[in-house]
Amino acid sequence: MSEPTAHGPTDPAGPTGSAQPPVDLADEAAKLDAGDELAAKRDEFVLDDATVYLDGNSLGALPRAVPARLADVVAREWGELRIRSWSESGWWTAPERVGDRIAPLVGAAPGQLVVGDSTSVNVFKAVVAAVRMAREDAPGRHEVLVDEATFPTDGYIAESAARLTGATVRALPAAEMPAAFGPYTAVALVNHVDYRTGQLNDLPGTTAYAHHAGARVVWDLCHSAGALPVGLDAEQVDFAVGCTYKYLNGGPGSPAYLYVRQQLQDRFDSPLPGWNSHADPFAMAPGYVPADGAVRGRVGTPDILSLLALEEALTVWDGVDIAAVRAKSLALTDFFLRCVGAYVRGGRVRSVTPAAQRLRGSQISLRCSDAETVTAALIERGVIGDFRRPDVLRFGFTPLYTSFGDAERAARALGEVVG
Amino acid sequence: MSEPTAHGPTDPAGPTGSAQPPVDLADEAAKLDAGDELAAKRDEFVLDDATVYLDGNSLGALPRAVPARLADVVAREWGELRIRSWSESGWWTAPERVGDRIAPLVGAAPGQLVVGDSTSVNVFKAVVAAVRMAREDAPGRHEVLVDEATFPTDGYIAESAARLTGATVRALPAAEMPAAFGPYTAVALVNHVDYRTGQLNDLPGTTAYAHHAGARVVWDLCHSAGALPVGLDAEQVDFAVGCTYKYLNGGPGSPAYLYVRQQLQDRFDSPLPGWNSHADPFAMAPGYVPADGAVRGRVGTPDILSLLALEEALTVWDGVDIAAVRAKSLALTDFFLRCVGAYVRGGRVRSVTPAAQRLRGSQISLRCSDAETVTAALIERGVIGDFRRPDVLRFGFTPLYTSFGDAERAARALGEVVG
């Protein structure tokens, strides 16, 4: 393990690598787990002790409560009540109700999030609406800034949104955005945590600079929501989107969410004005009149099975303080980096995740020349991370169910694999 | 029961109404059910004999095979295999695989349908892409024709698509479209079956006239797919969309599909180029390169729980001939109209569904001044239809599970309710 991470302030192992006695780390992990106030949450998930699951940043583990709820939704709500469930089982209002369940996790008051569609579709709604709003504020605003390391779909969709609205797109590093905002900026689309490196981008600062320049921001929270405090309301974020199948454990491809700040909802001009966002959808009126509030972000008929599985999955957050989640996340990633420093031969892997806590999300990404082979060998040993081309090993730490023991075992297995 | 329906060629009851002896109709229903080659299909659905479910045109009944499959998807594929299921359980390729399950039901060869997103979102993809294509063919094509009785979301989305592409929208009756196509027409967006009246619009004729004029067509199959033959390939339809929760029984809000004719796929220029439609999605490349084939219609991460519930629901179509479905559908709606004519006092309701079979989908809509009250009273009697403002009673007939006995009971209850 070499620079920069191993030299971080929280890395006493330093560059000496596997010269450290491994047994201490296993002991330390046990102690850390014993003192972990979130440790009991792990029992609310389906996990097996043979596996160290460090891919919750791609697909969260199954919350134990989900199968029974989903079985009831299918057998009783759909099978027996059928059409009546749209009202009697609360299906119709699920998008905004589930949005309100997510709201406290991202620092939002109720009435600003709506769940439905994919992240990509929500990025489209947000960017088109933001460009329209920015142009209303000042007609010359034509530029969409996108962080150049963005998860690709955001960039592709931003290009499409720009093409359809006559705007232009400029990609630049997220850290350069504050200096790049100007009179031509319409909106910045930024990933809160970089999917590849795990770097945490500066939401408060970037948002403040954008607003100072009269521009709007759209934050993609896919890799941050559920892992760290977001503070959408406190920072006066304009729009945000995020998926629900990573740290929110909603299940494969569970629907995404859209946040539109309350003060902007009346001006939210959606490019996807489906009937579910109509002020009176069952009037079936030929003319479109948008609903007030978060509902305006809806489009078509909501996907109920996935939405209600997600609703149940979100019950694991009852009583959880997101600040405690963040504290554990940082402790886990710090500890993992120390273990890697101790177990892995120097120079074999190199962290691309910032050592500084304030620049770190809840994953550690290690560059490794044979990362694809190493990922496969780790999976054989029951350590599930993932691989991002061409040479990155990703390890996600989900504070609700990842233990310090998991971190130690994963690092130890990595040391064995890379030799 | 008065004109026009009761005077249809298949209505021996004629205008004499409840003067006919009801007992004959119950007997006749029993005989028709005994001779119904699709009757055994009913056992593949969860239905209770206390209820006459005539709302399958809104939400299809639960296929018996779905709960076990979904339970396995949740407990084993998500719960145990977790991230591995994207490859090992075939999650990644589900959108096109499930599309190929729907294909034969709409007369399409494999490789042209992809499942995902809502109908509204798919209308958006299709209309924007159609406008782009029509303009490439001839730059002056700027008009989007929409059938004026359209399900509202299609009209709202068409307006948005037109606004974003600099096109205009003109609403007109579907029957007037063939005469309206001209050198300025880019695309016609037409509902195959009108959601309110149950009228079947002329897909072959309208499509041929559109092509003769150099325009494109987008057909909305929500109220036809699974109830009657569609013939997308045979009629050289350009684009089609449809939901899967009505006659395809995919469950509440199950994902919709998009059909792009094979010969047009290379020119399909999606306004929602999410990463799932990239030629090499896991390259995570900054530049968008569209995939070939139906996959190009994908956007974000597919909603696996709903998609695989739908996949299982589609197994009820194994061995079913859609021509037999259409024959039974027409027999059911004919018979229901006869029963209504016999049981319901003349003038109390009036069919707005065409009497002519070739203009009829698989529902019967009756105008009734107190339709909302009547719908509620029918539901109390276990007859589930629905109500569309201001005065329409809708009764949907799903040939796979609706019996002639259901039709007779529903009409009898209607006669009792309307007095």
Image (tube, coloured by chain):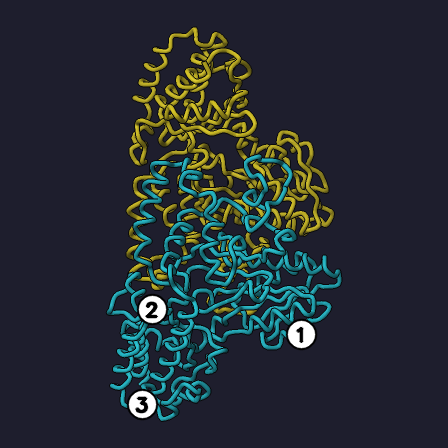
Chain colours: A cyan, B yellow
Which tag is nearer the camera, tag 3 or tag 2?
Answer: 2
Report crowding for label 2: few under 14, some 14 to 19, many 20 or more residues within 10 A (C-alpha): some
The residues bearing labels 2 and 1 have C-alpha atoms spaced at a distance of 41 Å
The residues bearing labels 3 and 2 have C-alpha atoms spaced at a distance of 30 Å
Chain at numbered mark 1? A
Identified by mark 3, the residue type is Ser
Residue A180 is labelled as 1
Residue A38 is labelled as 2
Instruction: Note whether residue B355 is visible.
Output: yes
Marks 3/2 in contact by CB < 8 Å: the verdict is no
Instruction: Note whether residue B291 is visible.
Output: no
Report crowding for label 3: few under 14, some 14 to 19, many 20 or more residues within 10 A (C-alpha): some
Q: Quadrant of the C terminus of chain B?
A: top left
Q: Is residue B311 left or right of residue B169?
A: left
Front in this rendered view, residue B111 or A358: A358
Residue A221 is labelled as none
Residue A18 is labelled as 3
Q: Is residue A165 left or right of residue A195?
A: right
Marks 2/1 in contact by CB < 8 Å: the verdict is no
Determine whether the residue tagged by mark 1 lies in a helix, strand or loop.
helix
Chain at numbered mark 3? A
Determine whether the residue tagged by mark 2 lies in a helix, strand or loop.
loop
Identified by mark 1, the residue type is Ala
Which tag is nearer the camera, tag 2 or tag 1?
Answer: 2
